[in-house]
Amino acid sequence: MPINRRAAAALVLAFLVLTGLVLAGGAAAQPAEEPAYASANQAYRIGMRAYRAGDAGAAVSALAFAAGEGVLGAQLKLAEMYERGDGVETSRAKAFQLYQQVADAYAETSPRHPIAPHVAGAFVKLAGYYMAGVDELKIAPDPGSAVGLYRHAASYFGDPRAQVALARLHLTGKGVPKNGRLAVNWLANAAKKRHAPAQALLGELLWRGGPGVRREPAQGLALLELARRNATTDDAVWIGDLYRSAREEAGPEAHAKARALGREWAANQGDDYDIPAAPPAAGAADSAAPR
């Protein structure tokens, strides 16, 4: 049976559509574009290899893809690069947004999970941005929001950096009531984790005493010595200065008691040094210690 021209044309068009040679709109189909990366994790690995090789452009492209897919390592690395201007133009706004993504996605991560310290670090960074404000995003300084972030990192994750930050705020009264007792207790929690800045700040507080903090010179000097031994390169200078100043002022009795405490703490094989929080000074208001 003969096929008329209209039917023949319809058959040809149907064949071309089925074989992918034309689109519904009549244009010739183009081959599907190959995805840049097989997976977000592959993009992260490629980005980190490029970063270590000094290829910032390739690193940012791959890390941005992985970060957009929620890869934690990519989000944190990219935030750090924007924060420091490491191979990219410095952008506090982009760093802030990346840390915010991490905080939103991982706030309820188990404190025992291996990624917990990294998530807590993002909370600490984000709190710092709220404390200072982000001009690029028209975010004014917001100590209240910063304190909430620090508290989550300090209480839920037990992060010593956040605990030290809260202690500093309680010492100055910025964003929280001024309270030397709470400052000491936050520092004691962090000091038990071998956190040298916490040990140094607590040692200085106990060495000198102050509002709400009774002077305990032997504990103070022992903690300053402990901090000096545990200090990283970044903190070695200021911690060393605090220790030398206290050592020069200390008398023989304080030196002897500090050495005895040091030996006692050194004998403890675990991380949980028996570092008690100082009692409040006479007349100071009591307050519940942080957990």
Image: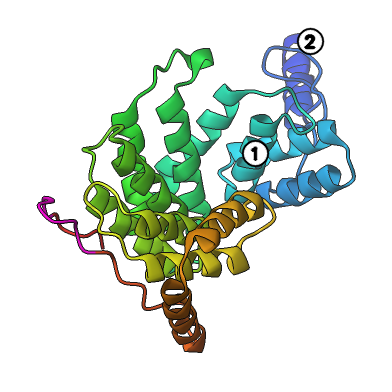
Judge whether residue 35 can be spotted in this image: no
Q: Is residue 48 left or right of residue 71?
A: right
Nearer-the-camera pick, 60 or 285: 285
Residue 133, compared with residue 216, is above or below; it is above
> How many residues crowd around disc 1 within 10 Å: few (fewer than 14), some, or many (20 or more)?
many
**Left or right of 258, for residue 169:** left
Residue 290 location (% of width, % of height):
25, 58
**Magenta segment boundaries in residue numbering:** 279-286
Disc 2 and disc 1 in contact, CB within 8 angstroms = no
Mark nearest the camera among 2 and 1 is: 1
Q: Is 241 located above or below residue 257 in the figure? A: above
Secondary structure beneath dot 2 equals helix
The chief SS type of the magenta part is loop
Is residue 50 visible to us here?
yes
Instruction: Say which mark, if any, is on residue 283.
Output: none
Q: Is residue 108 above or below residue 86?
A: below
The answer to which image quadrant residue 69 occupies is top right
Q: Which residue is mark 2?
A: 5
Instruction: Where is residue 255? Give x, y as percent.
Output: 48, 74
Percent coordinates x, y for residue 62 in the rendering = 75, 38
Q: In the image, residue 135 lies at what x, y percent?
A: 50, 14
Q: Label 1, on which residue?
A: 80
Residue ID at (57%, 49%): 72
Give the Cα distance between marks 2 and 1: 67 Å
